Image (cartoon, rainbow, N blue to C red):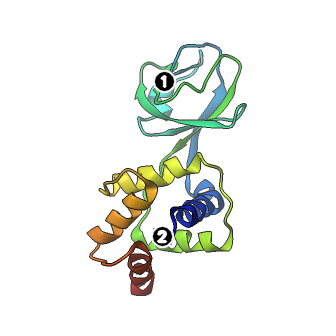
Amino acid sequence: MTNIYHTKLYRAWLQTRVTSLYTSTDSGTTDGTTANKLVQSGQNFNTTVSPGNLVHNTTDDTFAYVTAVDSATTLSLDADIMISGEAFIIYSIPSLSPATLEREFLMAELSLTVPQHNIAMWKQWLIAQGAVGNSTADLWYNYLGGLGYVGSLRQRQRQYWEAG
């Protein structure tokens, strides 16, 4: 199985399913510009946002993760995606059980189109589960190996899905 196939499969899974699993925790329009920050006066990020939340800049359709809540009005981000006057939505990261992951991942085989930014969500989930690797395919391969499945990535996936 090629990395291109896996990329399409992950993208499809994330596009078709993750948006229904993530919860919007905050939204608004920025009114300040600082590198790698999201700034909005009048906010109270201390009560609505946590490190690890996903920020979607809906103006530019770009994404970054919250690395710190600096204050009630300022968030540190892992990428420089916001300038003043841009709209955003902040999402919490779901905790997915292996059964949910399996069901949702299988949905990916129905549709093979997903924006690139969603790969980061998939990778973050795999890393949170303890998988190690440089690419999404490596993370998935190692995650399945950690569950006791052996062989190629395709063989591990088949064993995982058949174990139901």
The residue that mark 1 highlights is: 75
User: Within 10 Å of the Cα at label 1, are there few (<14), some (14-19), or many (20+) other Cα atoms?
Assistant: many
Q: Quadrant of residue 24?
A: top right
Between 131 and 59, the residue placed more toward the observer is 131
Q: Quadrant of the C terminus?
A: bottom left
Between 17 and 147, the residue placed more toward the observer is 147
* Placement of 63 over or under 14, stated as above or below: above
Which residue does the image show at 49% across and 55% down from the upper left? Answer: 122
Which residue does the image show at 47% across and 68% down from the upper left? Answer: 101
Left or right, residue 1 beside residue 133: right
* Placement of 78 over or under 143, stated as above or below: above
Residue 100, label in figure: 2
Q: Earlier in the sequence, mark 1 or mark 2?
A: 1
Between 92 and 148, the residue placed more toward the observer is 148
* Placement of 116 over or under 82, stated as above or below: below
The x, y position of residue 30, in whole percent, is 64, 20
Left or right, residue 6 beside residue 159: right
What separation in Å lies between label 1 and label 2 (alpha carbons)? 31 Å
Left or right, residue 108 beside residue 159: right
Seen as rendered, the residue at the extreme front is: 2
